Image: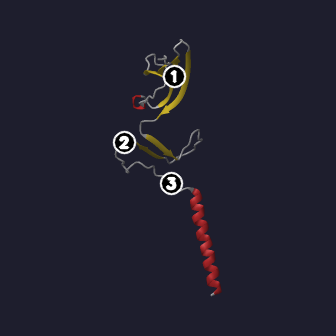
Amino acid sequence: MTEKSKITLFIDDDLQPVAEINAPAQFELDTRKLVDGEHTLKLVSTSPTGREGIRKIKFTVRNGPAISVEGISENAVLDGTVPLMINAYDKGNQKKFIIEGSETPQSVPSWLWILVIAFFAWAAYYMVRYMAMA
């Protein structure tokens, strides 16, 4: 039987590996043990002859409650009082869907208001023209 390459997995700069597996293999990375934020998965492959290969994969963990903010964006320049709509919701128990708090309320977009006003203006114009003919 031929020897297989060994793959060692590290998270961030940890000296202790998360797993050591023989290639080819499947591995499930449990992100619930990691803090939210940016991380790096480092894979070190060692061939049967002793040569090493390294691959680093950056990823972001977001297990905690998602936070949605409306009324301010990244690098915004603000002045005066700014109304914010803030919501935080969690995935919760993934075996049961909870509707309450799972959606972020949002204000009505301005393009929709313009469309509604234009429709009512057209309807009023049509009604005035219709009444003038009768």
Which residue is painted at 51% across and 22% down in the image?
43
Q: Considering the numbered disc 2 on the image, is that residue within a helix, a strand or a loop?
A: loop
Which residue is painted at 60% across and 62% down in the image?
114
The residues bearing labels 1 and 2 have C-alpha atoms spaced at a distance of 30 Å
Residue kind at label 1, given as amino acid type: Lys
Which residue is painted at 46% across and 45% down in the image?
86
Which residue is painted at 55% across and 45% down in the image?
80
| Crowd band around label 2 with a 10 angstrom C-alpha radius: few (<14), some (14–19), many (20+) | few
Colour scheme: secondary structure
Q: Would you name the residue on which mark 2 appears?
A: 92
Q: Earlier in the sequence, mark 3 or mark 1?
A: 1
Front residue of 78 and 129:
129
| Crowd band around label 3 with a 10 angstrom C-alpha radius: few (<14), some (14–19), many (20+) | few
Query: Depth-wise, is mark 2 or mark 3 nearer the camera?
Result: 2
97 left or right of 7 in image: left
Residue kind at label 2, given as amino acid type: Gly
Q: Earlier in the sequence, mark 2 or mark 3?
A: 2
Q: Would you name the residue on which mark 3 appears?
A: 107
Q: Considering the numbered disc 3 on the image, is that residue within a helix, a strand or a loop?
A: loop
Query: Depth-wise, is mark 1 or mark 2 nearer the camera?
Result: 1
Query: Depth-wise, is mark 3 or mark 1 nearer the camera?
Result: 1
| Quarter of the image where the C terminus is located | bottom right
Residue kind at label 3, given as amino acid type: Ser
Q: Would you name the residue on which mark 1 appears?
A: 42
